[in-house]
Structure formats: C-alpha cells, structure tokens
Image (cartoon, grey):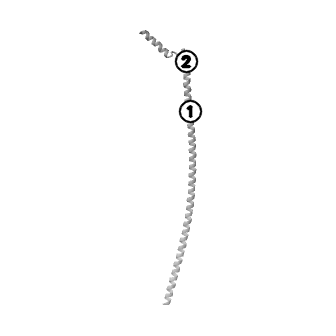
C-alpha cells in the first residue's frame, strides 16, 4: 500500500505541471494564455471607454440642445413680456385720454347746466316781474 501512495504523489505533481520554469513549453503556453486574457480585457476596456466617450458626447450634445432651447424660450418670453408691456402702456395711455375726454365732457355739461339754471332763473325772475307789473 505504501507504494501506491508514492505513485499518487508523482501523478499529482505531474498534473500540476510541476515547476513552470523547468518546462519552457508550459511557460510559453501560460504566457500566451495570460496575453490572450489581457488582450480580451484590453479590448473590453477599450470598448467600455469608447462607449463612455460616446455617452459623454451624446450628453454634451443634449446639454447644448437644452441650452439652446432654454435660450430660445427665454428670448420668446422676453419678447412676449416686452410686447405685453407695450400693449399695457398703450392701453393705459388710451384710457387716460378717454378719462381726460370724459372729464372735459363732464365740465362742459356742468357749464351748460349752470347756464341753463341761470337762464331759468332769469326767465323765472322776468315772469315774476311781468306778473307783478300786471297786478
């Protein structure tokens, strides 16, 4: 039984590949595999970097688009505000002119009313004088 145990130990060391420095073909194969793995990782990371740069570029374009839209909206809002302010001032001036016109009409009517009262008083006084003279 002791011999079998020794045999297994030899098989285990043979399966592990032993010391790679003693086996140049196994060492070369290990380096080739490591090289391939590193190349795959480099390709993956390069692809990720390209995707990240693409996403960044798209976000920058979106930000620029949003800034442009915002500037247009702000310009439109300013134009609307300026137009409404102009309309408000024009309407205010129109209403002030209408108020002045109506105040002038009121003053004219007051003057006419005063003249009509004076005329009525004169007519009433003359009538009273004529009635008094007849008596």
- The residue that disc 2 covers is 27
Q: Residues within 10 Å of mark 1 (few under 14, many from 20)?
A: few
Q: x, y percentage for residue 80?
A: 56, 54
Q: Position of residue 60 (x, y in %)?
A: 57, 40
Instruction: Reply above or below: 15 against 133.
Output: above
Q: Is residue 56 above or below residue 109?
A: above
- What residue is shown at x 55% (from left), y 25% (from top)? 38
Which is nearer the N-term, disc 2 or disc 1? 2
Q: Secondary structure at mark 2?
A: helix
Q: Residue at x 56, y 29 (%)?
A: 43
- Residue 129: x percent and y percent? 50, 86
Secondary structure under tag 1 reads: helix
Foreground pick, 54 / 79: 54
Image quadrant where one finds the N terminus: top left
In this picture, is 48 found above or below 32? below
Indicate which disc residue 4 carries. Answer: none
**Residue at 57% from the left image edge and 44% from the top image edge:** 65
Which quadrant of the figure has residue 33? Answer: top right
Residue nearer the viewer, 12 or 111: 12
The label shown at residue 49 is: 1
Residue 45 picture location, percent across and down: 55, 30
Whole-angstrom CA distance, mark 2 to mark 1, is 32 Å
């Amino acid at each position: 039984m002791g011999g079998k145990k020794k045999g297994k130990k030899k098989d285990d060391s043979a399966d592990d590949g032993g010391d790679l420095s003693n086996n140049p073909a196994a060492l070369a194969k290990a380096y080739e595999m490591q090289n391939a793995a590193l190349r795959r990782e480099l390709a993956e990371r390069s692809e990720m970097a390209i995707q990240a740069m693409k996403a960044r570029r798209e976000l920058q374009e979106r930000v620029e688009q949003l800034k442009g839209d915002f500037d247009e909206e702000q310009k439109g809002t300013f134009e609307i505000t300026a137009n409404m302010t102009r309309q408000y001032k024009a309407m205010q001036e129109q209403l002030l002119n209408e108020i002045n016109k109506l105040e002038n009409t009121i003053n004219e009517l007051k003057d006419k009313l005063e003249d009509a009262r004076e005329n009525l008083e004169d007519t009433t006084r003359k009538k009273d004088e004529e009635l008094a003279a007849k008596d």
